[in-house]
Amino acid sequence: MKARIFRSTAWVAASLCLAGSTALADEEEIEHQWLETSVYVQAAGSFAFEEFKSGIGGSNSLGFDLAAGLRITSWLATEVQFDWSDGMDPHSTNASKPGGVSWATTFNARAYPTTDYFMEGRIQPYLLAGLGASSFRTEKGREVGFATRWGVGVDTYVTEKIALTVGASYLWSIGTPIRDLNYVSISWGAMYRFY
């Protein structure tokens, strides 16, 4: 009889320990969910500072940028980024020419070199590099050329799925008929992760 009671007690204790460890594992997984592989979307407002060559003209402008990507590992993501600005006209010194719409689309790699260092990964600084195309409206028409994007930023997770994000990037345009149509873009917005 005592042996039967002992076996029953041992079985219940083992079951409780197993259930408790499973619950802790689930809790830990949720706690660090932002380090997992997932798809994400991001939307941000932006302000672009023109860096056009002297004599081209130019104007700063407000706009927005959108990105969609895949967080491949805890420290690397790939994405497509589109940014749009209104009024960044290379001929803005000419008062008779209204500001034009400019845009850029790049395929980026986003590296998170200090993942899991700050607040268990809630704060994640990143480095960004990308290749793509840029387009500017000029008095000659639409100028389209090759572009590279270089940037830095930080994602701050307020929940497992939502992060506030700020960033700065430099877009360097190459191959447009009017050269040196470059700009610095400051962005602020939010990211949503799909697990």
Image (cartoon, rainbow, N blue to C red):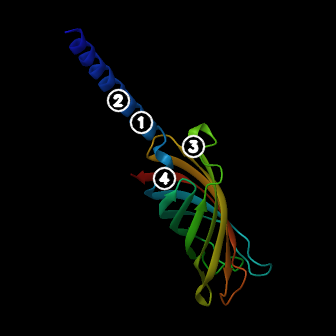
Distance between the Cα atoms at labels 3 and 1?
17 Å
Please, is residue 93 above or below residue 113 in the view? below
> What residue is drawn where x is 39% and y is 30%?
21
**Mark positioned earlier in the residue sequence (2 or 4):** 2
Q: Which label lies toward us, 3 or 1?
A: 1
The disc label shown at residue 91, or none:
none
**Mark positioned earlier in the residue sequence (2 or 3):** 2
**Mark positioned earlier in the residue sequence (1 or 4):** 1
Does any portion of residue 31 appear in the rendered image?
A: yes
Q: Residues within 10 Å of mark 1 (few under 14, many from 20)?
A: few
Please, is residue 28 above or below residue 154 in the view? above
Disc 3 element: helix
Give the residue pinned by disc 3.
Answer: 121
Give the residue pinned by disc 4.
Answer: 191
Type of amino acid under label 4: Met
Q: Residues within 10 Å of mark 2 (few under 14, many from 20)?
A: few
Type of amino acid under label 1: Ala
> What residue is drawn where x is 62% and y is 87%?
139
Give the residue pinned by disc 2.
Answer: 18
Distance between the Cα atoms at labels 4 and 3?
15 Å
Type of amino acid under label 3: Gly
Whole-percent x, y for residue 167 in the image: 63, 56
